[in-house]
Image (cartoon, rainbow, N blue to C red):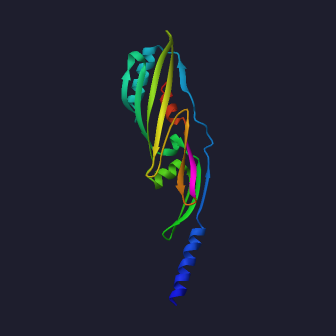
Amino acid sequence: MSRFLILLFVTAMSGCAAQSEFVYYDPNKKSPGDQSVVVKKTFDEAWNQLVRHVSQTFFSINNFEKDSGLMIIDFSAQPNGEYVDCGVLGAKWVEGYRPQNFTGNYAEYLSIYQGGKINGRANITIRSIDETTTEVRINSKYVLSSTRNTWSFTNKTADTLQVQTPKGLRKRTCVATGKFEGQLLDAF
C-alpha cells in the first residue's frame, strides 16, 4: 500500500511539473537613442523651466551647474514595465498546490516575483544655439536589479544577461522605453 501512495504522489508531482510552461520573446523596441529637443527659448528661460519641472516631479536633483548647463538627476521608477521593456514572458507553473500564471513585460515579472526595482541617473544638458534657441539633451543610465540579476543600460543601449530559469540558462534583454526622458522633455 505504501508503494502505491509513493507512486501516486510521484505521478501527481510529475503531472504538475509537466504543466509548467515558460515562453519568452525579446523586446520589440530598440533603445530610444538620442533624446533631445530644440526650443524657441533663451538659455535662462529653458533652464528655469527645467528646474521648475523637475522640482514638481518625483525626480531628485543630484547636482546642477547652471553656467555649464548641466543638471544631474536621480530617479526610481515603478511600475517597471512603463520605463523598461524586457521582452514578454508567458509563464504557467504550480507553486505548492496553487497554479500561477503570468503574461506580460518581464520587467513586471521581476517586480512582482523577484523584488525588481529601477534606479537611474540622467544627465540633462542645456546648450544655447543662438539668443532665442536652446537645445535640451538627456542621457540616462538605468539599473534594473532583482534578487538574482542586475541589468545596466542607457537610453542608447540595451543589456542582455543569461538568467537561470526552470529550463536552464536563458537570455533576457532589457531596453529603455523612452518614457522617462519623454516626461522630462514634456516640460518644453
Q: Position of residue 173 (x, y in %)?
A: 57, 44
Q: Position of residue 175 (x, y in %)?
A: 55, 40
Q: Is residue 98 positioned above or below 155 on the image?
A: below
**Residue furthest to the top:** 131
Count numbered badges in the picture: 0
Write the residue at 56% across / 27% down.
34
Q: Position of residue 140 (x, y in %)?
A: 48, 32
Write the residue at 54% across / 35% down.
178
In which image quadrant can residue 66 be found? top left
In which image quadrant can residue 53 be found? top left
Q: Which residues are magenta?
A: 168-174
Res 57 seen here = no
Q: Is residue 42 positioned above or below 138 on the image?
A: above
Write the residue at 44% across / 36% down.
120
In the rendered image, residue 100 lying in the magenta stretch gets the answer no
Is residue 24 toward the left or the right of residue 148 in the image?
Answer: right
Depth order, front residue of 104/89: 89
Q: Is residue 80 positioned above or below 69 on the image?
A: below
Q: Position of residue 158 (x, y in %)?
A: 56, 38
